[in-house]
Amino acid sequence: MNLASTIRTKRLVLIPATVEMLVHDRSDRRGLSRLLDAAVPAAWPPPLLDEETISQFIRMKEDGSDPNFCSWYWVRADRAGEGRTLIGCGGTGSSSGTPDAVMIGYSVLDEFQNQGYATEAIRGIAGEVFSWPGIRKIIATTYPDLKPSIRVLEKVGFVPACRKEQGKGMGEGTRVYTLDSPPKKDASEG
């Protein structure tokens, strides 16, 4: 099982979700705010983070059935006295039939979209994931009409898959994008 770390980027702190956080996310905004040390906007949760998804996350955290499952809460770091704010989330899970790959998904509150936060967070998550033993590829799926999501993937370096990727969660009509692990530097390269 990969143990995910807190990830810090220029403007964000990505906090690995715990079962306690996920339980509070369902119905206790105040509790979630306390655990994250961040304001939770009234618009929370973002698109795609529904009750069924949170229930699946809790189950996977509790039973450890997916060694590559991790979900991070995206907290915008304190900006000139504004305090910390929860703006989105994203995570990974194993890719069925592809042991050296993980699937990635993410969602951002509407008011924080188109500000580069998703690109920044996905870059941070990719760096973390590629430090995990044996992971050499990240797979993402999105619908062709979700242009902002495609742009995020492209900015991070994802490319359209050349072949049909197989795996659970591939929705009808989605496009598959992949990101390969950067080559490891040889110790002699300095």
Image (cartoon, rainbow, N blue to C red):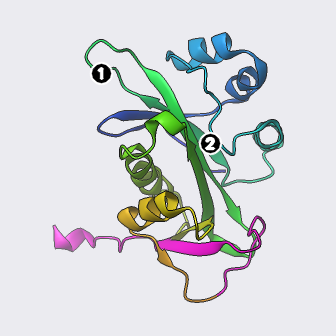
User: Please, which residue is most extreme toward the left here?
Assistant: 190
| Amino acid at dot 2 | Ser
Which quadrant would the C terminus be assigned to in this image? bottom left
Task: Check disc 1 and report the residue beneath it.
Answer: 79
Q: Secondary structure at mark 1?
A: loop
Query: Which residue shows up at 81% across the image and 51% down it?
Result: 65
Q: Is residue 8 left or right of residue 145?
A: left
Q: Is residue 128 magenta?
A: no
| Amino acid at dot 1 | Arg
Check disc 1: other Cα within 10 Å, few if <14, some if 14-19, many if 20+.
Answer: few
* 137 versus 111 height, above or below: below
User: Please, which residue is most extreme toward the front here?
Assistant: 145
Q: What predominant SS class does the magenta segment belong to?
A: loop
Task: Check disc 2 and report the residue beneath it.
Answer: 71
Query: Which residue shows up at 36% across the image and 43% down it?
Result: 115
Closer to the eye: label 1 or 2: 1
- In the rendering, at what x and y percent does residue 93 appear? 67, 56
Q: Is residue 149 left or right of residue 98?
A: left
Q: Which callout, 1 or 2, points at the residue further toward the start of the chain?
A: 2
Q: Quadrant of residue 10?
A: top left
* 132 versus 79 height, above or below: below
Query: Which residue shows up at 75% across the image and 53% down it?
Result: 66
- In the rendering, at what x and y percent does residue 79 appear? 30, 21
Residue 3 appears in the picture as rendered: no
Circles 1 and 2 in contact, beta carbons < 8 Å: no
Q: Is residue 168 magenta?
A: yes
Residue 116 or 164: which is nearer the viewer?
116
Q: Quadrant of residue 25?
A: top right
Specify the segment rendered in magenta: 164-190
